[in-house]
Image (cartoon, grey):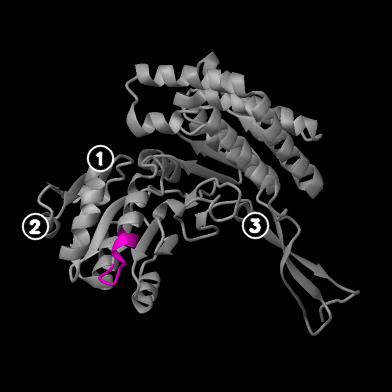
Amino acid sequence: MDDAGVSLQATMADMGRTAREGARALRLATPEQRTAAIRAMAAEIRKAAPAILAANAQDLSRAEANGVSGPMLDRLALDEKRLEGVAAGVEAVAEIADPLGVATSRWTRPNGLDISRVRTPIGVIAMIYESRPNVTADAAALCVRSGNAVILRGGSECIASNLAIHTAIERGLETAGLPASAVQAVKTPDRAAVGMILQGLDRSIDLIIPRGGKSLVARVQAEARAPVLGHLEGLNHVFVHAAADPKKAVDIVVNAKLRRVSVCGSAETLLVDKVAAETLLPPIAQALLVAGCELRGDAAARAIVPAMKAATTEDWTTEYLAAILAVAVVDGVEGAAAHIAAFGSGHTDAIVTEDEAAAETFVAAVDSAIVLVNASTQFADGGEFGFGAEIGIATDKLHARGPVGAEQLTTFKYVVRGTGQTRP
C-alpha cells in the first residue's frame, strides 16, 4: 500500500473511532437536545443555500461533461425550491416523536420481575448512496433523531453538493452542543474508502445502508462485514383489475409512472386484467402516449394498442427511471400476483379496483414491502407515510421493511426491574 493508501486508511479508521464517540453523545443527549440539533441543521442549510447551490452547479457541470443526462441528472440537481424542500424535510423530522426510551411492550412475571422492551439506537450507521444530495440531509436528520451516529459516503458525482450540505449540518450539531463526529462525510471520491467502510472500520460500524443502483447494492451485500439493510431497485407494478374505475385507472397509472420518473417509487410495469383489457387499456395507453411515455407491450397488449413497441424479457426486470413503461395483459388477480412474484423486486405494487374482495386478495398475495389499493406507487416515500423523511425503502424482510424512518433505525433492549429477586 502506498503512502496515499496508508493515509486514507488512517483517516477512515479515525472516522470510525470518532463516530463511536459521536454515537455515545447522541445516545446520552436529551430528546430536546436532539430536536434542537435537527432544527439548527435545517436553519443552517437555509443559511448556506448560496454555497450549496454553487457547489451543486459544479457537480452538474462535471456530470454533464461526463455524459450524465436525463433522470440521473435530475436526481443530482438542486434549485432553490428543491433545497427549501430539503430543509423543510429536516424540520419535519424534528417534529417526529423521539423514539428512544419508548417501551414497546411491558409485562410483569409471577415472581414480580417487571420486564420491558425499550427502543435504543443501533449505534454507528454507514450510508453509501449515489446521485442524491438530499439523502445527505435526510440521513443526517433521521440518524440524529434516532440517536445514531452516521458516516455518509455519497457518490463522486455529487461530492461538492454533499460536502456543502454536510458543512451546514456540522454547524447545526455544534449549535446544539453535540459533536460534529455524530454526522461525518467521506471527503474523498476514492472508491477505496467504500471498501474500508464495507470492512467495518475496525468493527466500528453496526449497520450499512446502501442506496443506489443494483451494482452498488450487490457489491455491498457481497463484501460487507457488518449487517446490511438492503434497498433494491423499484421494479414496481400497477395492476388494473377488471372492476377498476376507468378514470381512477388513468389518473393513477399516469401519476405512478410520470409524476417523477427518477424516483424509486415510479411504476415500471402496467398489468391489465384480460377480462376488461379491451376497454380499460386504450384510454390509459392514450394518456401515457400523449404525455410522452414510451410503451413496451406483450403480444396481447399490442393487439389492443398497436402503437406499443414489443416488450422483451428484459423489460419485465428493468428499472427504467425514464418515461418508459412495460405493459402486460394478465389473468386476473392470480395472474397479476404471479407476474409480480416472477419479476418484481418486492418494493411497491398497486391494484386499481372497486372490488373489495379482489383488493384484499391482491394485498394477501403480493409479498412486497408496500402494497397499495387505489393509489399511486409514488406514495412510496417516508415523508408521505408521516415519517418526516426516509433513508430509503428497505426490501429486506428482517429488522425493517418499507420506508426507513427514525423508528426503523432503532433496535431494542430488555430492561428488567426487580425488588431483590434471586433465581432458585
Q: Is residue 264 above or below residue 79?
A: below
**Residue found 73% across the figure and 31% down from its top:** 172
SS category of the residue bearing label 2: helix
Q: Amino acid at mark 3?
A: Thr
Q: Which residues are magenta?
A: 241-249
| Spot occupied by residue 201 in the image (x, y as percentages of width and height) | 59, 35
Residue 309 drawn in magenta = no
What residue sits 75% from the left and 38% below the top?
37
Query: Which residue is label 3 attached to?
Result: 411
Asked whether 16 or 424 is in front, the reply is 16
Does residue 271 lie above or below 148 as drawn?
Answer: below
Q: Secondary structure at mark 1?
A: loop
Residue 76 makes an appearance in the image: yes
Asked whether the residues under the numbered discs 2 and 1 touch, taking CB atoms below 8 Å apart as contact, a structural biologist would say no
Which numbered disc, 1 or 3, marks the residue closer to the eye?
1
Query: For mark 2, what is the residue?
Result: 303
Instruction: Give how far across and how far down residue 108 sits, in percent.
Output: 78, 79
Disc on the earlier residue, 2 or 1: 1
